[in-house]
Image (cartoon, rainbow, N blue to C red):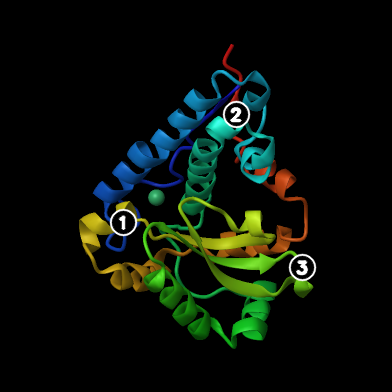
Amino acid sequence: MKHLLPPLPYDPAALEPHIDAHTMRLHHAGHHASYVASLNSILAEFPDLRERSALWLLLNLSKVPQKIRIAVRNNAGGHINHSMFWRAMSPGGGGAPTGPLADAIKRDFGGLTQLKARFDDAGTRLFGSGWVWLARAQRDGGRLEIRTTSGHDNPLMQHHFPLLLNDVWEHAYYLKHENRRGEYLTGWWEVVDWEEAARRFERSDHSVERDWEAEGGSLLEATT
Ligand SMILES: [Fe+2]
């Protein structure tokens, strides 16, 4: 079995002007593709691990041989987070969430304006390469939190279910926004797919492994 690069769910130019087509092409066909290729290459000599989903690998690093553990963490995480990231955005995105997710945002942040301010602040202050997230605690009554992760770590590794994520690696914005990460973060809300975040919120009480499989995230294909 091998891991596969999922197709972008829209044209690379579809998120203009907030994310330019050149960045999207490089990000998807360059960066994300390289994580998938590296993951397959790393696992080539480990037939048992080749049958596992990327999420299983990320959440079971203690069962991964030490000599490939860091590489698996980086590349499985990169594959998972980017697969989720493409789907977190839409050409018809922006606006505001509705329904139970909107209620939870009001309860835990006071409203969408406050959530955005805290998300942007966390993303701006994150040192180096990483991700900023809206996540739901799998404990503590399921409250919503803004979190950041370094490298390609995922909140699932910290018992938080991801609802929304933004990539603050420089490769996500530098060609267009240069060093103005804050400008990228604030503009990005115009392409956020709140319907996808709401779907993730509704699934956030369930098995994470099943969710990943259900959304096509395992992206495994028989090699024969
Ligand atoms: Fe990225």
Cα distance between the residues tagged 3 and 1 = 32 Å
Q: Residue visible at 51% across and 85% down?
A: 114
**Three-letter amino acid code at the position of disc 3:** Arg
- Count how many numbered circles sit on residues in the image: 3
Q: Secondary structure at mark 1?
A: helix
Please, which residue is most extreme toward the bottom here? 110
In x, y percent, where is residue 160? 66, 62
Crowding near pointer 3: few (<14 within 10 Å), some, many (20+)?
few
Does 6 sit left or right of 64 as displayed? left
Camera-side mark, 2 or 1: 1
Disc number placed over residue 139 in the picture, else none:
3
Residue beneath disc 2: 220
Cα distance between the residues tagged 3 and 2 = 30 Å
Crowding near pointer 1: few (<14 within 10 Å), some, many (20+)?
some
Disc number placed over residue 85 in the picture, else none:
none
**Three-letter amino acid code at the position of disc 1:** Glu
Residue beneath disc 1: 170
Quarter of the figure with residue 17: bottom left
Quarter of the figure with residue 16: bottom left
